[in-house]
Amino acid sequence: MTSEVKQTIVAALMQYRGDNFARASQAFRGYTPDQMAQQHGLSGETRQAVLDGYREHVERVDRAIAEVKARS
């Protein structure tokens, strides 16, 4: 894999990673555990579930980026 291809893949993954986790973390900052257990808008999920889903997405993408960077 060429360096240029690696850079392109990493850039695409960074776009896919997004900033939802950071924005949700900021939005829910200071919420009590009871508030985090409440449904978030019309999502059908609790605020905690939304935050956890974004965190898991970031972790998956970060692992993928690390694997791409580790390839020669």
Image (cartoon, rainbow, N blue to C red):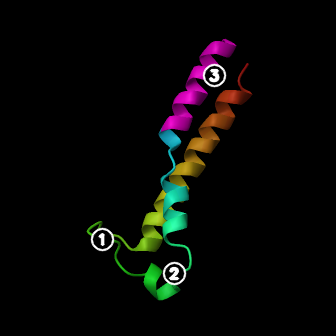
Tell me residue 16's x, y (percent): 48, 38
| Span of residues in magenta | 1-15
Q: Earlier in the sequence, mark 2 or mark 1?
A: 2
Q: In the rendering, at what x and y percent does residue 62 appear?
A: 62, 43
Q: Nearer the viewer, residue 5 or 20?
A: 20
Residue 4 lies in quadrant: top right
Up the image or down, 39 lies above or below 8; here it is below
* Residue 45 coordinates in the image, percent (x, y): 35, 70
Mark 1 falls on what kind of element? loop
Q: CA distance from mark 3 to mark 1?
A: 37 Å
- Amino acid type for the residue under numbered disc 2: Tyr
Q: What amino acid is at disc 3?
A: Gln
Residue indicated by mark 1: 41
User: Residue 44: in sight, yes or no?
Assistant: yes
User: Tag 3's secondary structure?
Assistant: helix
Q: Is residue 27 above or below residue 2?
A: below
Nearer-N-terminus badge (3/1):
3
Q: Is residue 1 visible?
A: no
* Residue highlighted by disc 2: 31
Q: Please tell me the numbered disc located at residue 7.
A: 3
Quarter assignment of residue 72: top right
Instruction: Say whether residue 61 is magenta.
Output: no
Crowd tier of the residue under label 2, counting other residues whose Cα lies within 10 Å: few below 14, some 14–19, many 20 or above: few
Give the amino acid at mark 1.
Answer: Gly
Q: Nearer the viewer, mark 3 or mark 2?
A: 2
Q: Residues within 10 Å of mark 1 (few under 14, many from 20)?
A: few
- The N terminus: image quadrant: top right
Front residue of 62/71: it is 62
First in sequence: mark 3 or mark 2?
A: 3
